[in-house]
Image (cartoon, rainbow, N blue to C red):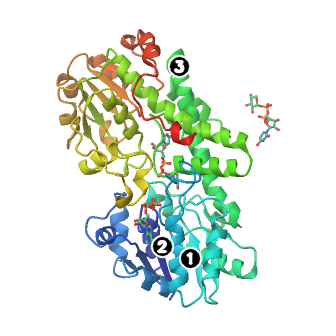
Amino acid sequence: MTKICCIGAGYVGGPTMAIIALKCPEIQVAVVDISAPRINAWNSEQLPIYEPGLDNVVKQCRGKNLFFSNDVEKHVCEADIVFVSVNTPTKTQGLGAGKAADLTYWESAARMIADVSKSSKIVVEKSTVPVKTAEAIERILTHNSKGISFQILSNPEFLAEGTAIEDLLKPDRVLIGGRETPEGNKAVKALKDVYAHWVPEDRILCANLWSAELSKLAANAFLAQRISSVNAMSALCEATGADVTEVSHAVGKDTRIGPKFLNASVGFGGSCFQKDILNLVYICECNGLPEVAHYWKQVIIMNDYQKNRFVNRVVSSMFNTVANKKIAILGFAFKKDTGDTRETPAIDVCNGLLGDKAQLSIYDPQVSESQIQKDLSMQKFDWDHPAHLQPSGPTDLKQVSVVRDAYAATKDAHAVCILTEWDEFKSLDYQKIYDNMQKPAFIFDGRNVIDVEKSRKMGFVVYSIGKQLDDFLKDMPALLSRRQFTVIFRLRTQVRG
Ligand code: UDX
Ligand code: UDX
Ligand code: ADP
């Protein structure tokens, strides 16, 4: 029986191993983590992450060939294949701070593997890491290995949160990078055989180690670039009277471009896009390619601009002040169908509004009050570091209340901001919401969720990303330009330099 161990029971490790266990009943899969609460949650009824369909898969396999454990060393020692899926935060200090990946967790995992191993192993990079990490890991492993042989593979994960199970069951591709030696090829074949249980052979791509590592950064950079491109268009649409949905539709019909990932939004979030692009920028700079670095940096600058622009629009539309006004925030997660708030645009938008002294009433179907309070009092880049490293910011912000439904959030509010595209926000009773709000009642739709015409007929003043401006807002550009750079907003460029 083949034994697989995955170090890191997070958003990537947990779902990926659950699907391997489901599809390969003869393989024993152990998912290990240093965090005891995380492992306890994986072993309980309430899994630590919300992911549609995941509960079902875990219930089918847990205790049979899928195990969650804190006994990291035992399971690593017994495994034939070790996946490493630990966090790789952005460095907060020292060389490359604000850009480079912090490989502390990776390095400590590699040293532990070398220490406890008594037999040869295939070590698989699963978390996104900078190009050439495999080489560094290989050095750590071989220098400490007591004669045991390790083969390093890069097998980046392309799943997106909210659709992880679907993505894992029917991946566009599985990518495996390995050394171009007989031993390397053998290791690649062993991992390929695991995926071949359910993935068609033509979708399993093999590459050299560096190509595999770089492909993950490139794919995320290309995806994020599409969003920044359409968001740049959304600003132009608002200025000229075009409709960004019509423009995206027309552009996406070109088969060379394709229709996906062209939804204008308040900005992209999530644990990968910004981190991976910053990483790419850093690698380019280190390799003497400032023009290439500059090109990719622009994707993030545009994303910051989009969030900033949204805050400015809210404040300027509401007569240039939101001080002491109740603003309902619908949606806090970085996208629908997840409770994940890492790098969510909602953090920046809320902080922008709080800086202007707004009173926020926040509702998200999957994000807890404590998570929201934590996110709004956290420093940049703290989110991916263990709790003990986090500087303690102010908690229990007085300007923020977190409520359990959209109607409570919007009652007596001056404005509604939609920041996540949860399906339930499409079918709210907006007439009821309008009736219970202060007038004029504003909606700022950062995800193009609502029916603009219908809402305007109800009496709302509506701003929707990249759509024609409400007559009420058309007089506002003068205000906007006057206060354009005055809204207090956590712009991230300082750290990026
Ligand atoms: C382009 C658009 O494709 C077309 O829809 C529009 O109507 C006019 O502009 P065209 O300039 O004729 O058409 O050719 P195209 O095939 O788009 O190539 C433009 C340039 O890009 C060429 O120099 C081509 O060599 C280059 N190119 C194209 C690349 O370098 N790499 C590619 O992958 C594709
Ligand atoms: C992303 C990649 O899609 C995935 O392949 C990789 O493995 C990890 O990073 P994820 O961050 O989970 O996945 O979600 P994704 O669906 O890519 O969305 C990222 C952000 O972009 C979200 O904030 C989303 O709302 C935003 N987005 C996405 C848009 O604003 N517009 C779009 O058209 C698509
Ligand atoms: P991702 O989204 O990439 O899956 P997460 O932060 O959700 O990232 O998960 C990474 C997990 O890795 C965390 O649960 C963390 O506790 C765990 N981890 C980090 N370092 C180690 C280590 N050396 N040994 C075991 N687990 C680790």
Spot occupied by residue 245 in the image (x, y as percentages of width and height): 50, 29
Q: Residue furthest front?
A: 94
**Residue designated by label 3:** 242
Spot occupied by residue 439 in the image (x, y as percentages of width and height): 22, 17
Chain-order first, disc 3 or disc 2: 2
Q: Is residue 489 left or right of residue 82?
A: left
Image height check: is 377 above or below 158? above
Image height check: is 190 above or below 421? below
Amino acid at the residue labelled 2: Ile
Mark 3 to mark 2 CA distance (whole Å): 47 Å
Chain-order first, disc 1 or disc 2: 2
Spot occupied by residue 188 in the image (x, y as percentages of width and height): 66, 75
Q: Residues within 10 Å of mark 2 (few under 14, many from 20)?
A: many
**Location of the C terminus (image quadrant):** top right
Towards the viewer: 411 or 314? 314
Amino acid at the residue labelled 1: Val
Residue 379 in sight in this render: yes
Q: Is mark 3 within 8 Å of ligand 2?
A: no
Towards the viewer: 450 or 415? 415
Towards the viewer: 237 or 134? 134
The residue that appears at 41% across and 50% down in the rendered structure is: 342
**Residue designated by label 2:** 20
Mark 1 to mark 3 CA distance (whole Å): 50 Å
Q: Are marks 1 and 2 in contact (CB under 8 Å)?
A: yes
Q: At numbered mark 3, what does the secondary structure look like: helix, strand or loop?
A: loop
The residue that appears at 43% across and 56% down in the rendered structure is: 384
**Residue designated by label 1:** 194
Residue 220 in sight in this render: no
Q: Residues within 10 Å of mark 3 (few under 14, many from 20)?
A: some
